[in-house]
Amino acid sequence: MTKQKKYWKGLAELANDPAIENLKHNEFVEKIPVDDFLGDGETLSNTSTSRRDFLKFLGFSTAAATLAACETPVIKSIPYVIKPEEITPGVANWYASTFYDGNDFANVLVKTREGRPIFIKPNDLSSAAPNARVISSVLSLYDSNRLKGVMKNGESVSWSDADTDIKDRLSSIDGDVVVLTNTIISPTTKSLLNAFSKKYAAKHVQYDAISHQGMLDANKDSFGQRVLPSYHLDKADVLVSFGADFLGNWLNSSFEKQYIANRNPKSGKMSRHFQIETNMSLSGSNADVRIPVKPSEKLNLIENLYNALKGNAPANDKIKDIVSELSAAKGKSLVICDSNDKAVQIMVNAINDMLGNYGKTIDLTQPSLLRAGDDNAVAQLVQDMNDGKVGALIISGVNPSYTLANAEAFNEGLKKVSLTISTALSMDETSTNVEYVCPDRHYLESWGDAKATLNQVAFTQPTIQPLFDSRQFQESLMTWSGDDSDYYTYLKNYWRSKVSWSSSLHDGLVELSSDSLSVSSFSANVNSISSQANGLELALYQSNSIGDGSQSNNPWLQELPDPITRACWDNYLTISATTARENGLTNWNISDGALNGDMVRLTVGDRVIENVPVLIQPGQAIGTLGLALGYGRTAAGKVGNGVGVNAYSLAIDNNYTLSDVKIEKVEGEHGFASVQLHHTMMGRDLIKETTLAEYIADPKAGNPDLLFDTHKGKLFADEVSLWKEFDHETGHFWNLSIDLTSCIGCNACVVACHSENNVPVVGKEEVRKSRDMHWLRIDRYFSSDMTEEVAEEQGLGAVSKYKAMEVPSENPDVAFQPVMCQHCNHAPCETVCPVAATSHSAEGQNHMAYNRCVGTRYCANNCPYKVRRFNWFDYAENDAFDYNMNDDLGKMVLNPDVTVRVRGVMEKCSMCIQMIQKTKLDAKRDGRKVLDKDAQTACSIACPTNALVFGDVNDESSEVRTLKSDERKYFLLEAINTAPSVFYQTKIRNRKA
Amino acid sequence: MQKESPIREPLILGNKSYHDITVDVAKPVLAKANKMWWIVFGISLVLFVWWILSVGYTIGTGIGVWGLNKTVGWAWDITNFVWWVGIGHAGTLISAVLLLFRQKWRLSINRSAEAMTIFAVVQAAMFPLIHMGRPWLGYFVFPIPNNFGSLWVNFNSPLLWDVFAISTYFSVSFVFWYVGLIPDFAMIRDKVNEKYWPLRKKIYSILSFGWSGKAKDWQRFEEVSLVLAGLATPLVFSVHSIVSFDFATSVIPGWHTTIFPPYFVAGAVFSGFAMVQTLLLVMRKVVGLEAYITIKHVEYMNIVIMLTGNLVGIAYLTELFMAWYSGVEFEQYAFLNRATGPYWWAYWSMMTCNVISPQLMWFKKLRTNIVFTFILALFVNVGMWFERFVIIVTSLHRDYLPSSWTMFSPTFVDIGIFVGSIGFFFVLFLLYSRTFPVIAQAELKTIVKSSSEQYKK
Amino acid sequence: MSKKVIYGIFDDEEVLLKSVKEVRSKDISIKEVYSPFPIHGLDHALGLERTRLAIAAFIYGVIGCAVAILMTYYIMILDWPQNIGGKPSFAYYLNMPAFVPIIFEMTVLFSAHLMVITYLFKSKLFPGQESSSPDPRTTDDKFLMEIESDDEKKISDLLKKTGATEINVKDIA
């Protein structure tokens, strides 16, 4: 039997304390009313906390907990613009927006990752496609030189102090209040300006950095409306441009699409494009007939054309064809001119009127509203400022201290103005001369609307929280006019009534019930414009990359090679070989190949610019010079400062063609950063081309089959291959077709590639060492007078033949050829890599495994296309390369889907594999096939003329498949049988034999 | 006991007994270094330091400190590599091939030639390593899987063939050299007086692996030498053929040439002998071995130089002919550009040094003239360097697409690494000449009776 | 009567060779001959059978060749056949031409190194090994014949007769 052991809970129990006994029997000191609470339904329902309340509390606390968990950090890291639940980290969001900086206009889609805008692509709903500058604008958002807050005489102050001070002084100012802006195409901004003007009796002056006064006034005189017409190049079968570089920067209203629309050889019909110009421009290099002339001669030719068409005079030999073809194509032709002289534009209007082009290829009832600047008003303003008539000056969107020819006078005037305010984003030339700088926001941080034409409004919406303590110009206006609501509400209320707000915001633009402009028929007296200029003549132009210079501090643009000269990080006097010889000027290559040139002192009237480098440019009219505007910034920032010379100072009275120019050679030499040092094709058929007539006769014209003689007879390259081929029939097989006929060399693809693939900027010195890192380049070739045939006739030896072939013609044909990794299916680079860092995918891409690469550079040597790029140094986090990758702000533009390459590693075009993967995953998620055009590359997206077509050739429905079987298709260097996945389409010019 | 026809000129001058040979060979090792040696050594040491600094700078900063660019991805680095490998051929060739052909005159020079081979290959091997963008990942080229799975090396790549060829060549040459050294180390060991130099005694007895010259060991020794020679001979030819594959298997006009393997081998022998000539002419003076490295030896080597020089010359002409005959415009331009393009000077200095100057060797007077021989040997060395430069740079700088044509010019780092490698080489060679038996005395003793002057009287 | 080691030292290899034949004809076994350089015919005279190192080398070569083939096969074809420059990696024979250099080099590598290792091993040559030569002059210009016998007189006379310039005798304790 077991003994029951007894444990005492304490001495008290041992002593049998009654209290303990008590406790033992009722454990709880107070009785808990469990039963009478739950037991009896009535009391339960009467209790203050009902079941519903309880659930409410539960719900609240859960919600509170959740919010507390995610609130602050999330909002900080991802500044949502639209419904947060749409955002998944790692998945990009796209927002429709609109770019307008007074020069370029484009409807764009902005790609944001985790709240950071990183890429800009065209908005397919619109024809206004972004050019290289607009695509690069995403980097300007992260410009470390942007102002972090309000500045007063260089001291930073708070917005509230600034506003109170500004408001007081505005209301008590003597002298006029003037608002100086770029052309305003935003209806809301206009009305805000009106409100502001009412309050302070302010004047509003609009100013275009690049003036179009002549054209505007000409149209006022001719048709009673001071507007720019909109053109329909797609309807023009004969297109005659007197210097207007419409494919480049003329009017900046993306004519590429229209132009190419009427130049499709498949349709058997191409427009005839004549270009009569001074500098070799993008348009000129694409023209079917290009006539280099001095600016003065150009005017004479216009007048001659006018008279010839009237029948008053015989046509000048140079333009005989033009006259005949124009008169043959009445109503289906177009004559344009870049002159900023009213008389000239009136005559051009008259010519178009004679040809009956108005209402057909030219439309004044739906004008382009992108330019409305009034130079006289600006001149008057400068006058008034110096006379002390101006009490307050608010400058927005323009940089007159830099862009005005008489900037000195303007700056003097500023001193006499008691209150000067600039809303520049950074301390630019103007801001440094004003009292207050109230930084505006970058368009990617802003709300806005834009009315480029009467029948359409486009919207700008923020894609990121403001990076700095800045405020939109519009909001500043509101504050200063005493309206304390915010601009967003204002904008919304303004448009809500007129358009469906959210849908148009989603699309980025919306058609308006078309109100059109009423114009009188042509009525203006046409005066003679014939001119006799002596000495050298200078034609100022906008460079393809820098444009008007507002984005000079953008390293992508600075390193973007000019499509014609292929030089970057510079502006220079372009000069013809002959004129150079006459003036004893030369260009030469130094031992490492880099291009050097002489420098001159440039004198125009009383303006002198020292040490202007001279670049010999084939196609430049003899006796003329060209110089790009937009360079020579002094307060652009660390990147843009001191790059090139400022040509605005020469454009006196906004005259962009100047005569009697003097150049004298000065000591020293200048180093150019040119990415292409050799300009001709050396008689190799790298770019196959033919004329329209020949193409119609034989679609394979200029592109004969490449056959190899074998014992089995003539065979194609792929048939004589020694190897058993890998299967590329099953699954995807990504190919890229590049149509050389519709490639106009606009550089949009290059910048898009740069931005999508985190391509580093290496700076001028490295580019000079032939170490530019562009994954995609656009080779530009000039024709040479020496060809195999000529050599044959003259019986030249090979040596002298090739020597002669290196020299481009005086007025050469120009051809562009985008070259990126060709993704060869017999890739020479893959075979030679000792560590298998580069190998081929089943989908036809040539892969590059960066972290496997040891950097022997053997692949680059063995690449016949020389598209591989080596990281000679660390380009990120390296003070020697202080561009966007060296500061935290600039790094925000990096694409998280693409590795930033380290030093010692080979890199190259990946066919945007990250985009392809995304497309495939999306298709997989939706359980569908990948559709044609789903998968795109940065370059094919950016191409405004659809010259680059990307897709899966194993997909029957794909466009690229049809293009691959096109008669014009050819492989670059087909003879070495690298079997590329990239192929080209023969270039076709509409040229009379 | 083999006999040799009395018509043949003696390979050993003076009345050298076995003992004399022992003494002569041991002398440079046991005696103090003369002033001359210290001067040359000092200069080489300075250059070597320059090499170290340049290499350090390159690895620290990036390949960008060289003159290379997007079009010319190899220049002086690989030029030097091929140049040194070429030089590194004579040694093994002299010992192996001449051994197979029972050429007794090899015996006085093969030891130093092999030493030179090994030091040259050391220099050569440096370049593929430091020319990498990320040399610290150099081990990627060995057949080991990567950390994440089965990403191996690529055996299709000529550069990987190089890795195997060079490492095999280096190690086999080294072994061949050392096997021959063992008996001679033993000789030195027995010459060193333990009382004065206990340490040296120790070192040499370690180096000599306890060799004692037993009959059986000698039998094995000869067998091993013979077999190694048999293996090394095809190896020599294979190595430079494989080096030439780096170019021959590519698609670049001027590289893509089927005659490269024999052409490179001839070139290698050519430059190798020239370098041996350069070194021995100095060494026979500096360490006084005129009796063993006779005019006869010099003349024999000159004949080889002339012969291979002409082979190389024929190769050059064949290239030009093939370019013309192929009818391929790229090919034709590549060779026209070599001769008349921006690098014409390199091409013509190559032609002068490698093809024209060796023709002077037809004259016995000249080929038996020490001074002239020395100068000509230097010429050939320069010429062969230019040959590699021409092949590599002028082919790359203007290849298929004129848009990417450019030029190359070296930076001071390029120069530093090249000149420095020469310094490095001489540092090694001079140390060798003071511490190693520079003549295969054991084997040389076997021919005293057959081909030394006294017995031919 | 105790066993002795007799060292006959010669100045000339030809004399030595004769004497070796002489001694052997009297069927006295020669323990060892030490010489500063290889003497042709000595191994026959001493009746040493020819070495089989060459055969070993051949076998090693075959092994190296096999290793190379297996390595390239496993790495390029079996483990991860990639599409490298379109070169067919479907079957070994298709890709093999690219591996010939590797196979050759590996063959030589194995053959040479393993043979030398065998040689050093067989001849007991390795760092730290002491020389077993009874007289250091044998690496200079002397030739030494070593005979073990208990009839010292007879041997030394014979050696003298056949041209030994010096005779040393040592007891084996």
Image (spheres, coloured by chain):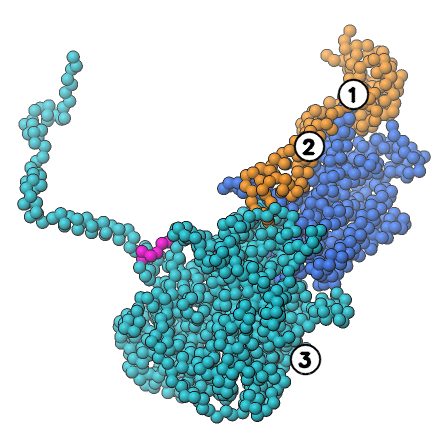
Q: Which residue is mark 1?
A: C48
Residues in magenta, as a range:
A84-90
The residue positioned 58% from the left and 71% from the top of the image is A564
Residue type at tag 3: Glu
Count every numbered label the image shows and give the total.
3
User: Depth-wise, is mark 3 or mark 2 nearer the camera?
Assistant: 2
Instruction: Determine the CA span between mark 1 and mark 3.
Output: 94 Å
For the C terminus of chain A, the image quarter is: bottom right
Q: Which residue is mark 3?
A: A582
Instruction: Determine the CA span between mark 3 and mark 2.
Output: 75 Å
Residue type at tag 2: Gly
Residue B229 location, x and y as percent? 76, 35
> In the displayed structure, would residue C111 be above or below residue A946?
above
Between residue B235 and residue B14, name the one nearer to us: B235
Q: Is residue A88 magenta?
A: yes
The single residue placed furthest to the front in the displayed view is: A697
Q: Which chain is blue?
A: B
Q: Secondary structure at mark 2?
A: helix
Q: Colour of chain A?
A: cyan
Q: Which chain is orange?
A: C
Q: Is residue B143 visible?
A: no
The residue positioned 49% from the left and 55% from the top of the image is A955
Image-quadrant location for residue A125: bottom left
Q: Residues within 10 Å of mark 1 (few under 14, many from 20)?
A: few
Q: Which residue is mark 2?
A: C61
